Image: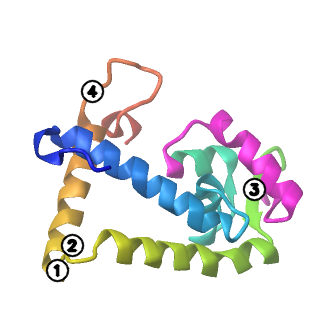
């Protein structure tokens, strides 16, 4: 049963859309024996050099402890490996294994399927505008001073 979306505030619609799209993505990732957080970790590591857990957490906008369990499970499953940093042996770098690299194709397939589903009936121009608006909203949230000082804003990170 569908609800009457005409009377839901924008933030409510955004939350509902994110929840439903997350459920659909979860279903698609299960086909490849992955979950959404594992997929985002693999995709982030695929973007470049090996990262420390702290660097990975920063790129994913989460706290390092929040991804510890996922990293341990992924290492045990053979998706990622740890290796000492070349310059500082105290730092362990996370990198993709062959199995992790092979999953990237599946992650991109899920992304393309989700794009097709979400953007059905939306023109290329509207997609670009929506992306620009999302980026602006994201920037607004980063620039807004937080009442909780546990996470620095972008202004404090630079």
Q: Is residue 87 visible in the rendered structure shown here?
A: yes
Upstream in sequence: badge 4 or badge 2: 2
Magenta highlight on residue 85? yes
The local secondary structure at tag 3 comes to strand
Magenta-drawn segment: 59-86
Residue that mark 2 sits on: 127
Q: Which of marks 1 and 3 is in front?
A: 1
Query: What residue is pinned by disc 3?
Result: 93
**Of the pair 99 and 95, the residue shown nearer to us:** 99
Residue under circle 1? Answer: 123
Query: Label 1 vs label 3: CA separation?
Result: 41 Å
How far apart are the alpha carbons under marks 2 and 3?
36 Å
**Pointers 2 and 1 in contact (C-beta within 8 Å):** yes
Q: In the depicted view, which residue is nearer to us: 2 or 108?
A: 2
Q: Which residue is drawn at 48% across and 44% down?
A: 61
In the rendered view, does 17 fall on the left or right side of 86? Answer: left
Of badges 4 and 2, the one in the foreground is 2
Q: Which of marks 2 and 3 is nearer the N terminus?
A: 3
Structure colour scheme: rainbow
Mark 1, Cα crowd under 10 Å, few <14 / some 14-19 / many 20+, is: few
- The residue lying at 75 percent from left, 56 percent from top is 93
Give me the C-alpha separation between circle 2 and circle 1: 6 Å
| Residue 25 placement (x, y as % from top left) | 51, 62
How crowded is the residue under tag 3: few (<14 C-alpha within 10 Å), some, or many (20+)? many
- Label 2 sits on a secondary structure element that is helix
* Disc assigned to residue 145: 4
The relative height of residue 104 versus residue 74 in the rendered view (above or below) is below
């Amino acid at each position: 049963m569908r609800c009457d979306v005409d009377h839901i505030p924008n933030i409510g619609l955004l939350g509902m859309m994110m929840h439903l799209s997350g459920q659909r993505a979860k279903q698609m990732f299960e086909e490849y024996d992955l979950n959404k957080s594992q997929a985002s970790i693999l995709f982030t590591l695929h973007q470049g050099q090996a990262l420390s857990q702290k660097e990975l957490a920063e790129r994913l906008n989460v706290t390092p402890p929040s991804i510890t369990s996922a990293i341990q499970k992924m290492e045990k499953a053979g998706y990622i490996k740890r290796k000492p940093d070349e310059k500082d042996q105290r730092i362990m770098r996370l990198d993709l294994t062959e199995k992790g690299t092979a999953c990237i194709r599946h992650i991109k397939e899920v992304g393309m399927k989700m794009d097709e589903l979400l953007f059905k009936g939306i023109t290329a121009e509207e997609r670009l505008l929506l992306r620009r608006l999302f980026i602006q909203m994201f920037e607004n949230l980063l620039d807004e001073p937080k009442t909780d000082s546990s996470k620095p804003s972008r202004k404090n990170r630079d």
